[in-house]
Image: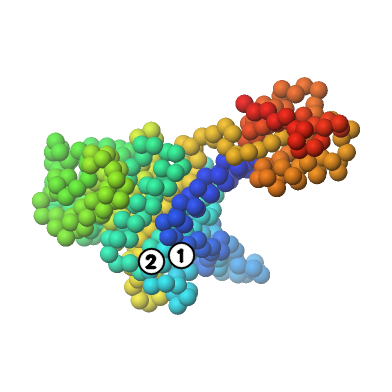
Amino acid sequence: MRDFLPADKAHRERLLAIIRESYRAHGFDEIETPVAEDSDRLHAGLGGDNEKLAFGIQRRGLTRDDMQAAGEPLDLVDLGLRFDLTVPLARFYASHRAELPPVFRSIQLAPVWRAERPQKGRYRQFVQCDIDVIGEPTNRAEAELLVATLDTVDRLGLTGAFVRVNDRRLLIGMLETFGFPVAEHEQALITIDKLDKVGQDGVVEELRERGLEGAAVDALDAFFRRPQTMEFLTFGERAIRKALPEGADDAVVAELAEIGAAVMRARGADPQAVLLQFDPFLVRGMGYYTGPIFEHAHPDVPYSLGGGGRYDGMIGRFLGTDVPATGFSLGFERLVDLLQRAPGSEDRAIALLHDADVALGDLLSLKSVLVAQGARVRLLVRPKNVKPALDALAADGFTHFAFVTADAVAPDALELRPLG
């Protein structure tokens, strides 16, 4: 968990404002949910491995006898900090369905908490930027999410990013084609999900070490070694079929191809542009995904910048009736690291370096005039050594400065000079 200095905080808020405005422009509405949820809900099997990282909030009024009688640590808690924004959204929709439109498009920009082990690039408190479409059963939802996400990333100024796409149904179909028994699917997917880290040989070796079906592992190994297996440079029905083993579900392939065509058309992209990339080995760790899955990637970094997918079964756990849902989450902290703070990011930020004898009323009056004109204004007693002060102001995002003396405090007497 971290503190943020003013310049860093301003940078973060500027990026969040761009993300919020972009999502709203695409027809999504922002909601807010509590930071804490019922512990039973957070440990209902919906959050995959993230449930193991949830911070619990101990029940109030516990006695020593209560603690000694507890069989498990979770027996002592009744609430927990949210580890993502999807589980709270499912609970929110189940609670407010009658007040929401039939197809609800939500925005959530908020912190989440996970008891991560401290390591580079991992935090225990971090911000997620989620958009979700609830109530739309067709692939229109996926196409909308992808277009909104790609547009938002463009507005942030990040170039070269693309989205890797797969479908949970194709993954399961691939495992069945290779001959993995249903009981081994979860272990196989956990291992395949490490492909980017350990490579093809590492995946095959781990599957053998786990004792999974030998013939199925051999079939996967042979599939890895096809020349065309790892060539995912374009997105379309032909590329998808080329990357899959024979017998893949035609309907699912056609659905993904339709999503890709719609996104490319909406974006007005060059047919050869790599906006979407089909990856038959994209897993996404969450067990609640039921259809298309996504991962936001950039060639400059080895990790994902976000992801999501369809999770049609989750809301039904709360509502008792299945509701189609799909979502996409941008990893805000990783985007912040890539999008370095631009100097002078404020539209108009003015520092007034005034002499010590300038009347306070005159200074505040001058400041009020500039603020009314839309400027951000800071008052600063003029130091003996001006240069370090100006450098610090520029680093804080100020764009202009002016010297103010007791004889020149009128707005038209200001001589604004650029900073930086």
Question: Within the image, what quadrant is residue 242 found in?
Answer: top left
- Residue 284 in view of the camera: no
State the separation of the CA atoms marked 1 and 2: 10 Å
Relative depth, front residue between 102 and 171: 102
- Residue 263 in view of the camera: yes
**Can you name the residue that lies furthest to the left here?**
246
The location of residue 222, given as percent across then percent down, is 13, 41
Q: Residue type at mark 1?
A: Leu
State the mark number for residue 134. 2
Which residue does the image show at 22% across and 45% down from the upper left? 235
Nearest to N terminus: mark 1 or mark 2 = 1
Which residue does the image show at 39% across and 47% down from the upper left? 151
Question: Within the image, what quadrant is residue 234 found in?
Answer: top left
State the mark number for residue 361. none
Secondary structure category for the residue under label 1: helix
Going by the image, does 134 lie left or right of 256?
A: right
Q: Residue type at mark 2?
A: Ile
Going by the image, does 115 lie left or right of 364?
A: left
Going by the image, does 351 lie left or right of 212?
A: right
Which residue does the image show at 54% across and 63% down from the upper left? 32
Q: Is residue 110 above or below residue 351?
A: below
Relative depth, front residue between 293 and 125: 293
Dot 1, how many residues are within 10 Å of its Cα: few (below 14), some (14-19), or many (20+)? many
Residue assigned mark 1:
89
Q: Is residue 4 above or below residue 259?
A: above
The location of residue 266, given as percent across then percent down, is 30, 51
Which residue does the image show at 64% across and 68% down from the upper left? 60
Discs 1/2, front: 2
Badge 1 vs badge 2, beta-carbon distance below 8 Å: yes
Secondary structure category for the residue under label 2: strand
**Can you name the residue that lies furthest to the front here?**
412
